[in-house]
Image: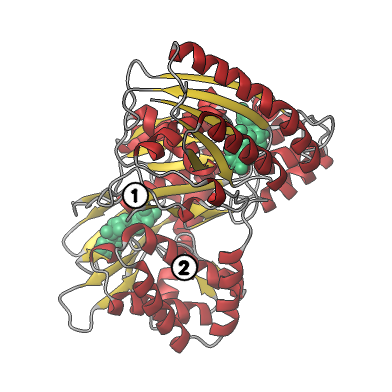
Amino acid sequence: MRVLGIEGTAWAASAALFETDDPTRATDDEHVFIESDAYQPESGGIHPREAAEHMGEAIPEVVQTAISHARERAGGDDPPIDAVAFSRGPGLGPCLRIVGTAARAVAQRFDVPLVGVNHMVAHLEVGRHRSGFESPVCLNASGANAHLLGYRNGRYRVLGETMDTGVGNAIDKFTRHVGWQHPGGPKVERHARDGDFHPLPYVVKGMDFSFSGIMSAAKQASDDDVPVEDVCRGLEETIFAMLTEVSERALSLTGADELVLGGGVGQNDRLQRMLREMCDQRGADFFAPENRFLRDNAGMIAILGAKMYAAGDTLAIEESGIDSNFRPDDVAVSWRGPEESVDRVVETETEVQGAEATVTIEADRVVKDRVPRSYRHPALDERLRIERTRQEARLTSEARRHGVPTPLVLDTDPDEARLVFQRVGDADLREALTADTVAAVGRSLARIHDAGFVHGDPTTRNVRVDTGREDGHVFLIDFGLGYYTDEPEDHAMDLHVLAQSLSGTADDPETLLAAAEDAYREESDHAESVFASLDDIEGRGRYQ
Ligand SMILES: C[C@@H](O)[C@H](NC(=O)OP(=O)(O)OC[C@H]1O[C@@H](n2cnc3c(N)ncnc32)[C@H](O)[C@@H]1O)C(=O)O
Ligand SMILES: Nc1ncnc2c1ncn2[C@@H]1O[C@H](COP(=O)(O)OP(=O)(O)OP(=O)(O)O)[C@@H](O)[C@H]1O
Ligand SMILES: [Fe+2]
């Protein structure tokens, strides 16, 4: 089978030929040819109009080159390709329209089917394809996006994502501020090698994260004459530690033991080393494809296009419109079985390796050690471990004073980052998901919010359930990411984190979430403003 791929969501005008006997798996004799022509802004960042002008000129040329290559490979077969796959979105509308037009023209010329590919799903599927992993957690670190995805119930679920800009765009904004030419990522990487770590804000909320505060602080530091090498080093150490931490959280939540990386920022060597080190330490497998498949390229479009074509997932010309806000979880996945899942059964053992800590389970107490994470810069690592241990001890007790079931704190030693708790419940919520148990979580969150603080990470693994009791005693644990705040938006984030973790671990997330939200509404003194903020968070345009 030979599939032509066309990519052109923003900066890369690219066409590719993927030739294989079996698109469902990587084989030794598969062949990927990629021809790309990059748009390079003269100054500033990507200008949508200029980018579209570039696409208009470059797409016909790269497509022609890929077709000529296909003819050579086909050795007289007519037509030389079996299908045409194109990036349908997300991306810049004017660029996507040029790609769509080119793809339709080629499909009609050879009278072959058209396949519409989601660019972000292609970023992760190329890594899954080349690694041979079954059902990994996927970290997409690209220019306009940053998210964690896991396949469950026929779709890629968003387990976590940026709350503001994409990771590459955030870095590029900083480099524009210091007057460097686009793209900034490779320049930050080069300068960081000569720099000393400059501390910057670290913002992780459950498996979501935000870059805006870091970027303002980085610009300010450089205006204040902190050497730019040091700021670059601080940026890499901070941003990539955040991405590594949320990836580890996703592995811990789902029980998965495979991680793949995708996206242009994935070319960064420091990011790859951090992710590999984290995975090695928890016994997970890590894979990053070659750079030509990480940055925007049509090879990944052709590879996923071939899988979709083999599954019969093609588009009629009249239905082949583009979608500039195409989200990865909008895609009904045709090329994977409905029973496959990122989510694995996690055995309860005497020692649990969470995302942050090693928890030793004893008869009636548990000992939680935030052991150093060697992938993080030591100064950042120590700060996070001590702060979070202090905060966890304080908020676990405070929640209990407000009538929320939590374990008793038996001993604290912040300098050693160690806490001892009463052992509670006999299962994590993810193994005891019912309308009643999640409603209890909704009620508890409403209470702590009314008391002026948030949990910060209310996932289905951070709740313990006493399944033997009729009234199902439900305990909140792991308050390490909690903080004091009366902002409805912060309160709404707790509900958003709960919703994301339900979609990653539950079979009927909608019903369960409704039960949690109803209970929250009943209990809370300010539910209206919280749900208004939640609508904002969930409707926020992420592709900035
Ligand atoms: C929608 C689509 O157009 C978009 N594509 C995109 O953003 O291009 P991509 O090739 O995946 O990523 C480009 C980004 O990757 C960054 N980048 C490239 N090399 C880097 C490096 N060595 N270190 C850090 N960032 C790097 C660039 O600065 C730029 O921000 C996306 O996937 O979000
Ligand atoms: N007090 C407790 N009683 C019973 N089990 C507990 C208790 N505290 C923790 N556990 C068990 O240990 C697991 C990990 O604990 P915890 O969430 O505090 O660690 P973590 O490293 O912060 O994990 P993560 O960041 O992945 O949520 C929990 O999911 C739970 O199964
Ligand atoms: Fe991309």
Ligand 1's quadrant: top right
Quarter of the image holding residue 536?
bottom right
Residue sitting at 67 percent across and 43 percent down?
Answer: 97
The reply to whether discs 1 and 2 touch (Cβ–Cβ < 8 Å) is no
Residue 137 is situated, as x and y percent measured from the top left of the image, at 38, 44
Disc 1, SS: helix
Give residue 519's quadrant in the image: bottom left
The alpha-carbon separation of the residues under discs 1 and 2 comes to: 18 Å
Q: Is mark 1 within 8 Å of ligand 2?
A: yes
Position of 403 relative to 15 (above/below): below
Q: Residue at x 53, y 15 (%)?
A: 69
Residue 58 got which mark?
A: none
Give me the disc on residue 252: 1
Question: Image check: 57 left or right of 297?
Answer: right
Foreground mark, 1 or 2?
A: 1
Q: Observer-nearest residue: 377 or 419?
A: 377
Crowd class of label 2 (few under 14; some 14 to 19; many from 20; radius 10 Å): many
Hey, what amino acid is under mark 1?
Ser
User: x, y percentage for residue 133?
Assistant: 32, 34
Q: Tell me: residue 344, above or below residue 479.
A: above
State whether label 2 is within 8 Å of ligand 2.
Answer: no
Count of labels shown? 2
The answer to whether 395 appears left or right of 144 in the picture is left
Residue 62 placement (x, y as % from top left): 64, 23
Helix, strand or loop at disc 2? Answer: loop
The circle on residue 455 is 2
x then y, percent, for residue 347: 19, 52
